[in-house]
Image: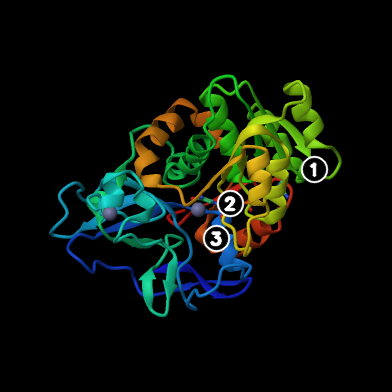
């Protein structure tokens, strides 16, 4: 099968690899219709996260058709259109039962094979989905492949961010980072009644999309986001901040926008050794900080409904729908944040 594979930092390859196949009787084999390129793929791409084996099939956002079913799978049949969260989940361990599906005791991240152990990813014609009954979700009819795909990762992550930040009706919310995750965090914050979202980035086309999605967009290169937040809050600061970058600078920026008692949700994947806030500052300003991998499987049913209700808006986030053969070049341009490269979805069957 054709796939996008990891070779070394900033080097991927579009190549033939052995077909994915069933291993355990609880597996399903999916023919991939849509596979996203996520900001999280950029961490191994740029070498911020290390350990990925050469030849690992990249990608953890996947929607497709069930083409083969293990004998122990009861919930899915050949031909079903399904979407997966970016990690597998058994559905029955302590963490799955309590909703923290991202920490399933048997969970694995798609697109991460290290020292021969792990799961290949979805930027391929076929992908093996272990623990299929606890992992996969059926896609409602009428939902576009590329939009439904987002329920398995970034749309659920955006809702998780609103939850972690305790976003409620009437809140003023700062969103730091207007990549695909931050842009959808604008949608989810407004969906749950935020009065105002101030969105911060420096990429002009991403800021334009943020405005389109209903935020007041501020470039941190040319303007001071705190001034904009102050105008909306009588100088208090934002009630909640959602950081969707993954850097000390972004943590700092988000904290600086909060009011005393404010809540900071860190969605970005961080690779620094220390938090950019001191315990003393958190005490003195009564700040809360919450972070973590989104338990996407738990959020997916609600995310699919949100996607149906906002299909056109969410579709407008997807700037590029490309065949798999153009995936390597697409990584380069998405990683470089070229103007207009908001969200890339690869279509292996195109
Ligand atoms: N928690 C989870 O489960 C989860 C799920 C998906 C993605 N993520 C993470 O979320 C982050 C965002 O993902 P994405 O796909 O949107 O990535 P992305 O790289 O496309 O977007 C990041 C954006 O942040 C902007 N940025 C950089 N520094 C900034 C700063 N100091 N202030 C404001 N903006 C700044 C960039 O210009 C860019 O537009 C990544 O770290 C990704 O790994 C986490
Ligand atoms: Zn992701
Ligand atoms: Zn589990």
Q: How far apart are marks 1 and 2 (CA)?
A: 18 Å
**Measured from the top left, where is residue 21 in percent x and y?**
28, 68
The residue carrying mark 1 is: 220
Q: Name the residue under label 2.
A: 268
Measure how far apart labels 3 and 2 are at the Cα level. Answer: 12 Å
Q: In this view, does 104 lie above or below 139?
A: below
Q: Position of residue 294 (x, y in %)?
A: 45, 48
- For label 3, the crowd category at 10 Å Cα-Cα, with few meaning under 14, some 14 to 19 and many 20 or more, is some
The response on whether ligand 2 sits within 8 Å of label 3 is yes
The nearer-to-camera label among 3 and 2 is 2
Question: Splitting the image into 4 quarters, where does residue 142 fall?
Answer: top left
| Vertical comparison of 242 with 212: above or below | below
Find out if the beta carbon at label 1 lies less than 8 Å from the nearest ligand 1 atom: yes
Tell me what residue is drawn at x 67 percent, y 38 percent.
Answer: 285
Residue indicated by mark 3: 41
Ligand 3's image quarter is: bottom left
Choose the circle earlier in sequence order: 3 or 1.
Answer: 3
What is the x, y in percent for residue 88?
33, 56
In the orientation shown, which residue stands out farthest toward the right?
222
Q: In which quarter of the image is residue 197?
A: top right
**86 with respect to 271 (left or right):** left
Quadrant for the N terminus in the image: bottom left
Q: Nearer the viewer, residue 24 or 14?
A: 24
């Amino acid at each position: 099968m054709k796939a996008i594979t990891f070779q070394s930092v900033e080097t991927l390859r579009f190549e033939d690899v052995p077909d994915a196949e069933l291993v355990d009787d609880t597996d399903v084999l999916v023919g991939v219709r849509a596979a996203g390129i996520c900001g999280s793929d950029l961490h191994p791409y740029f070498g911020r996260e290390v350990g990925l084996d050469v030849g690992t099939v990249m990608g953890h956002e996947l929607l497709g058709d069930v083409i083969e079913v293990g004998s122990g799978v009861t919930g899915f049949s050949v031909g079903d259109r399904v979407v997966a969260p970016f990690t597998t989940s058994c559905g029955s361990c302590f963490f799955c039962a309590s909703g923290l599906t991202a920490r399933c005791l048997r969970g694995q991240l798609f697109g991460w094979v290290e020292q021969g152990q792990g799961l290949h990813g979805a930027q391929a014609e076929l992908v093996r989905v272990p623990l299929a009954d606890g992992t996969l979700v059926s896609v409602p009819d009428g939902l576009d492949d590329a939009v439904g795909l987002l329920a398995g990762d970034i749309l659920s992550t955006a809702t998780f961010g609103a939850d972690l930040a305790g976003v409620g009706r009437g809140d003023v919310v700062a969103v730091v980072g207007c990549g695909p995750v931050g842009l959808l965090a604008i949608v989810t914050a407004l969906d749950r009644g935020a009065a105002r979202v101030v969105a911060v980035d420096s990429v002009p086309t991403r800021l334009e999309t943020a405005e389109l999605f209903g935020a007041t967009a501020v470039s941190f290169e040319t303007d001071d986001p705190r001034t904009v937040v102050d105008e909306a809050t009588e100088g208090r600061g934002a009630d909640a901040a959602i950081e969707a970058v993954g850097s000390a600078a972004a943590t700092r920026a988000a904290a600086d926008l909060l009011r005393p008692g404010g809540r900071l949700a860190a969605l970005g994947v961080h690779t620094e050794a220390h938090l950019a806030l001191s315990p003393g500052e958190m005490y003195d300003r009564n700040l809360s900080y919450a972070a973590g991998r989104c338990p996407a499987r738990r959020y997916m049913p609600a995310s699919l409904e949100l996607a149906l209700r906002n299909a056109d808006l969410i579709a407008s986030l997807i700037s590029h729908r490309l065949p798999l053969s153009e995936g390597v070049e697409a990584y380069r341009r998405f990683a470089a944040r070229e103007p207009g490269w908001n969200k890339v979805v690869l279509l292996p069957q195109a």
